Amino acid sequence: MNAPASSRVRQTQERTRRERMLRILLPFVAMAIGVSIWDLVVRLNDIQPYVLPSPGLVLETLVRDWSLLWSSLLVTLTITLEALILAFVGGVGLAILFNRSRVFEYSFYPYAVILQVTPVVAIAPLLLIYLPQQAAVLACAWIVAFFPVLANTTLGLHSVDRNLSELFQLYGASRWQMLRDLKLPAALPYMLGGLKIAGGLSLIGAVVAEIAAGSAGAGSGLAYRIAESGYRLNIPRMFAALILLSITGIVIFALLSLVSHLILRRWHDSAAQES
């Protein structure tokens, strides 16, 4: 490689490194500016904590009420993860069944769409009548997380390269071999994309169902703590619980993105371009 070409490569690598640093640092800078403005507004206008607490008071409340908030977060997190696992297993399994039988797909796919477009906040009270509370909350979280996995996996299984499909048929591959060696690998990026969407939705479903359930006690989730704090005008605790929920959603999305990247980075363009 000659000197000008080597210099261009170094410049490109340096530019890529700067862009990565900016992508990491800029969100923190924006958050610091936002928190500073929030604190300044509270101090300059002497706003009372029951109207808008300062960031410092929210942080103090988060530390002081940590044991209560943490136990509630564990309840919500457990429901979210259970719903996500069930959504992944159910969505992928049903998508495979749809792919194996067009009659089955045409018969039941519309009902999956109906289940998705019906607001979960309207379904939750009905489920709470017929199911135990814990099962009803889990069902609500599953309903909103299930469809993205199903829809994306179905799309992936139908998006197999026609030439490769004909090649497998030419060599006499069985339907199981077609599914295992061609369709499922081709659908994997779609499947993981659906799982990333489902991660956030399962948390939303769990929160909505917990608020609808509205039960108190040791097994209360974080959503109920927010509602309870609102009734008591404990606004700093509301903010602290909301921050915990937001962090939980970010962590779930980051972990699922990492899993997707690790699985796809060696062979799929979408992951290779990010690395």
Image: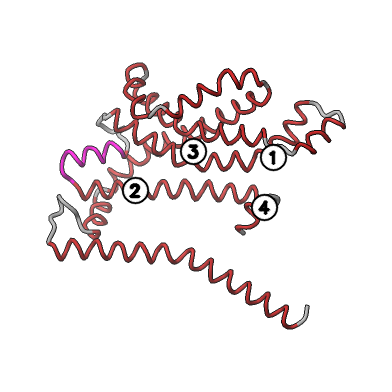
Secondary element at image label 2:
helix
Secondary element at image label 1:
helix
Location of residue 3 by image quarter: bottom right
Q: Are marks 3 and 4 in contact (CB under 8 Å)?
A: no
103 to the left or right of 171: left
Residues shaded magenta: 223-234
Q: Is residue 224 magenta?
A: yes
Secondary element at image label 4:
helix
Kindly identify which numbered label has been placed on residue 244: 2
Give the x, y percent position of residue 189: 63, 43
Q: Residues within 10 Å of mark 1 (few under 14, many from 20)?
A: many
Q: Residues within 10 Å of mark 3 (few under 14, many from 20)?
A: many
Q: Which residue is mark 4?
A: 269
The quadrant of the picture occupied by the N terminus is: bottom right
Q: Earlier in the sequence, mark 3 or mark 1?
A: 1
Q: Is residue 170 magenta?
A: no
Q: Of the residues shown, which amino acid type is indicated by label 3?
A: Ala
Which tag is nearer the camera, tag 1 or tag 2? 1
Label 3 to label 1: alpha-carbon separation:
20 Å
Give the x, y percent position of residue 171: 87, 32
Residue name at image x 24 percent, y 56 percent: 60
Q: Of the residues shown, which amino acid type is indicated by label 4?
A: Asp
Q: Which residue is mark 3?
A: 198
Which tag is nearer the camera, tag 2 or tag 3? 3
Give the x, y percent position of residue 116: 46, 29
Give the camera-side residue of 113 and 209: 113
Give the x, y percent position of residue 224: 27, 36
Q: Earlier in the sequence, mark 2 or mark 4?
A: 2
